[in-house]
Image (spheres, rainbow, N blue to C red):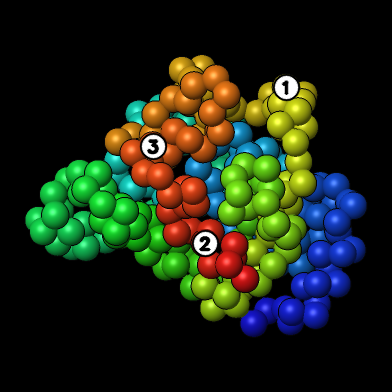
Amino acid sequence: MVLSKEEVQKLDEEFAKKSAEEFLGWALNRFHPKMALANSFQTEDMVVLDIAWRIQPKVRVFTLDTGRLHQETYDMMDRVRDQYGMNLEILVPDSAEVEAMVRSKGQNLFYQSTENRHECCGVRKVNLLKRLLSGVDCWVTGLRRDQWATRSSISKIEIDAGNNGIVKLNPIADWTDQQLADYIRVHNVPSHALYQKGFTSIGCLPCTRPTQAGENPRAGRWWWEQDLQKECGLHVAAAEK
């Protein structure tokens, strides 16, 4: 464990009222280069990337390529490389695991049951994340408290019990939609093209749809499920702490 629970609690209180820039500045000074930013190319992750990059241009950034992403997401990978001049780490699932799963349950197993959907997310996303996080001391997300019920109580800094007790940072946990929009505009941060097509939360192509007016932003994720968590397993361990 990189930090004790007591240290994490003290730091969370210390940074509660400080800016994301101050928080990431401290984190980069403390953990770089053993720190990695997760990026799905959605607004929150792009804002965190931009802030961190302005502090440390060599910040480590990774993304999970499930093999089922929208073409617009692959286009964003190229845009990020070009604009920030960084070596974006693209993680792909183990081909043998994918082959075994698909042979047993089909390409679209996730529509059949919640259990199958979690299995697919596990093979195509969670296993990749665990593999990368086994080699770092700290990882950073763009989670915000008002995104979904399971995220309403996240801290800016926490211990990720599901990943060997490494440190997990959520520097914009307390940001509002307006803060995100203002930052994107002022700093000319690249924006995912699917937002212009009615998407408000973007995942794999067969598991994501545009949302309707009045719907929760994550309602377009696994829309055929009634499960209120709307999580894939990447952040559940922290949410249950």
| Residue lying at the far front of the rendered structure | 226
SS assignment at label 2: helix
Looking at the image, can residue 187 be seen?
no
The image position of residue 51, as x and y in percent, is 73, 42
Q: Amino acid at mark 1?
A: Arg
| Residue lying at the far top of the rendered structure | 196
The image position of residue 175, as x and y in percent, is 76, 41
- N-terminal label among 2 and 3: 3
| Front disc: 1 or 2 | 2
Q: Which residue is mark 3?
A: 223
Q: 10 Å neighbourhood of mark 1: few (<14), some, or many (≥20)?
A: few
Q: Amino acid at mark 2?
A: Val
Q: Residue at 85% of width from left, 47% of height from top?
A: 19
SS assignment at label 1: helix
**Is mark 1 in CB contact (under 8 Å) with mark 2?**
no
* Label at residue 185: 1
Q: Residue at 30% of width from left, 36% of height from top?
A: 206
| Front disc: 2 or 3 | 3
- N-terminal label among 1 and 2: 1
**Is mark 2 in CB contact (under 8 Å) with mark 3?**
no
SS assignment at label 3: loop
Q: Which residue is mark 2?
A: 236
Q: 10 Å neighbourhood of mark 3: few (<14), some, or many (≥20)?
A: some
**Is mark 1 in CB contact (under 8 Å) with mark 3?**
no
- N-terminal label among 1 and 3: 1
Report, in whole angstroms, how far the alpha carbon at label 1 lies from the one at label 2.
Answer: 31 Å
The image position of residue 49, as x and y in percent, is 64, 43
